Image (cartoon, helix red, strand yellow):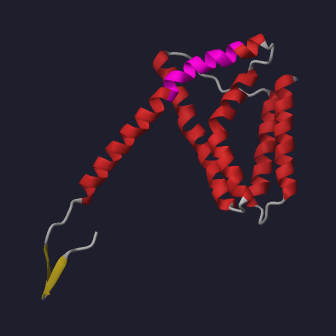
Amino acid sequence: MEIPFAERNSDLLTVTGPVDDPSKSNKNEIIIRSAVLIVTILPIVLLSHNMATVVDYGIKAANLPPLLGGVLIAIIVFTPESMTAVKAALNNEFQRAINLCHGAFVSTVGLTVPSVLIVGLITGKTVLFGLTATEMILFIITLLLSLMTFLGKRTTPMVGIMHLVLFLVFIMLIFNP
């Protein structure tokens, strides 16, 4: 904030005019933004249970594997970020595309997983995050490929194709474990 008027008398600096307390305006802004966040997320949370019921019914009716429900929900959740990331990538805005993808990942891991664990603690239910041997191998391959992608100096189309092939293997394993 800029000081309206200041005079220098020897070693003293005197300020005349109104000076706002920045911490008070920051607290008000945090409260307003938190309230808006809760108001906008509340309908999504309330509707998600009904949506999960519809998705589960559709999967059972179509005789599809139950794991497909999680993939469909993930697709629905990540679609806005994915569309924006693809648009950024097409415009050669690599850093923006990476930031969008990492933001979506961090919000999922940083918010969803702790929320599920807290709900499990509150309800007294055991929450298991188990991976089968096949899923563990796929996870390790994904981790190594991601390290190779982000630690390299350049990302090539071949690395992108390898990511897509790995995703197709994941989808195939849902239908044929």
Q: Quadrant of the N terminus?
A: bottom left
Q: Quadrant of the C terminus?
A: top right
Q: Residue at x 79, y 31 (%)?
A: 135
Residue at image location 88% in from the left, 55% down from the top: 158
Residue 45: x %, y % from top left: 51, 26
In this rendering, the answer to whether 32 lies above or below 17 is above
Asked whether 56 falls inside the magenta stretch, the response is yes
Judge by depth and name the residue closer to the eye, 114 or 165: 165
Task: Tell me where the magenta segment starts and ends, as one range.
Answer: 44-57
Locate residue 148 relative to residue 100 in the image: left or right: right
User: Residue 39: x, y in percent?
Assistant: 41, 33
- Vertical side of 30 occupied by 1: above or below: below
Q: Is residue 87 magenta?
A: no
The number of callouts visible is 0
Let me know if residue 113 appears in the view.
yes
Q: Say if residue 177 shows up in the picture.
A: no
Locate residue 106, reporting x and y percent: 59, 44
Give x and y (percent) for residue 175: 85, 23
Q: Say left or right for 2 vs 176.
A: left
Relative to the observer, which residue lies in front, 12 or 174? 174
What predominant SS class does the magenta segment belong to?
helix
Q: Residue at x 61, y 44 (%)?
A: 104
Judged left or right of residue 12, residue 173 is right
Residue 106 drawn above or below residue 149: above
Residue at the spot x=53%, y=33% of the render?
114
Q: Image quadrant of residue 149?
A: bottom right
Image-based side of 117 in relation to 53, left or right? left
